Amino acid sequence: MILAIDPGTVQSGWVLFDGLRAVAAGINANEVVLGLCASCADGRASVLAIEKIEGMGMAVGKETFETVHWSGRFYQAWPGLRVARITRREVKLMLCGSMRAKDPNVRQALIDELGAPGTKKAPGPTYGVSSHAWPALAVAFVASRTLR
């Protein structure tokens, strides 16, 4: 099981991914996600995957530095040994084959690979994933395929 996080300045998207489906997903305040990282010592997940910020040659602002700060706090709170830091570039190339891919392209590629969300009565493998949890699922998917 992989706990994957798309870190943000105030809140972050996260997914618990078993390699085939999103077992749980959400968007929560960073303090809550920090607690989730620490609580995974109970064996719910054996790998932490975090979207890694990478330099693209452009100036960045305080929001980027705050996101990096939280990324480090999540890493530090992780009780396990296995951590994967996955860049957006890796996600786009693995799922879409192009750096020009946008968020909707990545979401559609995940649905093509894993299956549609479905409905409450008939949940699919991506059921419950929304908003910032989609990038977290993409990070989990890439981590699951590269950490073998």
Image (tube, grey):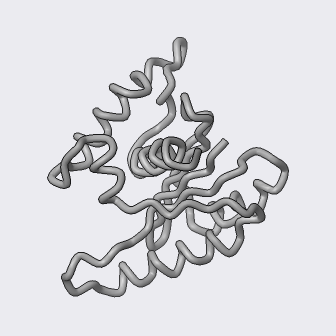
Image quadrant where residue 138 sits: top left
Q: Residue furthest front?
A: 148
Q: Is residue 43 left or right of residue 116?
A: right
Relative to residue 60, is residue 104 depicted above or below?
above
Which quadrant of the rendered structure holds the N terminus?
A: top right
Residue at x-position 15% and y-position 52%: 100
Residue at x-position 27% and y-position 84%: 60
Residue at x-position 49% and y-position 20%: 124
- Residue 58: x and y in percent read 19, 82
Relative to residue 58, is residue 3 depicted above or below?
above
Q: Nearer the viewer, residue 122 or 91?
A: 91
Which quadrant of the rendered structure holds the C terminus?
A: top right
Image quadrant where residue 95 sits: top left
Q: Residue furthest top?
A: 122
Residue at x-position 48% and y-position 71%: 10
- Residue 81: x and y in percent read 73, 63
Q: Is residue 76 left or right of residue 128?
A: right
Q: Residue furthest right?
A: 42
Q: Is residue 26 visible?
A: no
- Residue 18: x and y in percent read 62, 35
Relative to residue 125, is residue 22 depicted above or below?
below
Q: Is residue 11 left or right of residue 91?
A: right
**Number of labelled discs?**
0
Q: Is residue 16 visible?
A: yes
- Residue 137: x and y in percent read 47, 44
Q: Nearer the viewer, residue 14 or 98?
A: 98
Q: Is residue 55 left or right of residue 16?
A: left
